[in-house]
Image: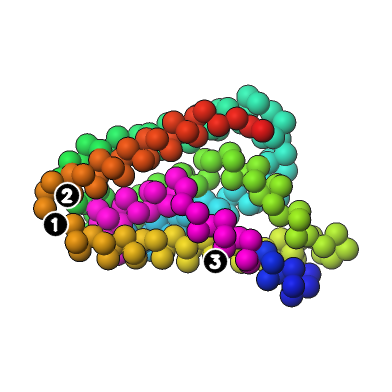
Amino acid sequence: MSLETWIAFVAASSILLVIPGPTILLVVSYALGQGWRAALPLSIGVALGDFTAMTLSMLGIGALLATSATLFTVLKLLGAAYLIWLGVKLWRAGDEMKVEAVTSPAAAGRMTAHAWLVTALNPKSITFFVAFLPQFLDHKGDFWTQMAVFEATFLTLAFANAFGYGLVASRARRLVRSPRVIRGVNRTGGSLLIGAGLLTATTRAA
């Protein structure tokens, strides 16, 4: 793999990651509710979710999802239902800032699991990696070495991107003090997550 190819991969990945999706909506919503303490476990969950999606793509599951409408639909509906459940939970938080308090390793673990599931249960991510990664592979080079480099690079970028969004949201949290504003933030975030779940549910495989 040439340095130019790696730089092109970094540039393309950075552009794709910075565009907010369901995962970033989750990170922002939780960071607004809990503050900077939520940024780290959520970012770890995002990286693990992307690692799952990339590994499944590498193992050929992405190609299977692209050809099996039933499998794609099942995974898609699971992910959509989870997003909607999280959105309803946030909506019902009302004027409470603490959506999930990071008061123990167990609480941080649950938050990491939320982010991992939202990221990993997106079949579009898996099929996307199937189409995206081959563009940068050198077919004359060692496949596994290249995949290790690409995965490490993408996961580092995904972690940094989610962590950055989380820190920005936690900064904005300081401006959110009144119960009315807090309620509005929770309901807006909840509505966006529910909308993302509905959008995911209506997304077609191709």
Give me the residue at 60% from left, 30% from top.
204
Q: Is residue 19 highlighted in magenta? A: yes
Residue holding disc 2: 181
Q: Which mark is residue 139?
A: none
Q: Which mark is residue 156?
A: 3
Residues at marks 1 and 2 touching, judged by CB atoms closer than 8 Å: yes
Q: Which residues are magenta?
A: 10-36
Give the spatial CA distance, label 1 vs label 2.
7 Å
Give me the residue at 63% from left, 66% from top.
10
Q: Name the amino acid, label 2.
A: Val
Q: Name the amino acid, label 1.
A: Arg
Towards the viewer: 173 or 52: 173
**78 to the left or right of 104:** right
Q: Name the amino acid, label 3.
A: Thr
Towards the viewer: 51 or 200: 200
Residue 193 screen position, x and y as percent: 37, 40
Front label number (3 vs 1): 1
Coloring basis for residues:
rainbow
Q: Which mark is residue 177?
A: 1
Give the spatial CA distance, label 3 vs label 2.
34 Å
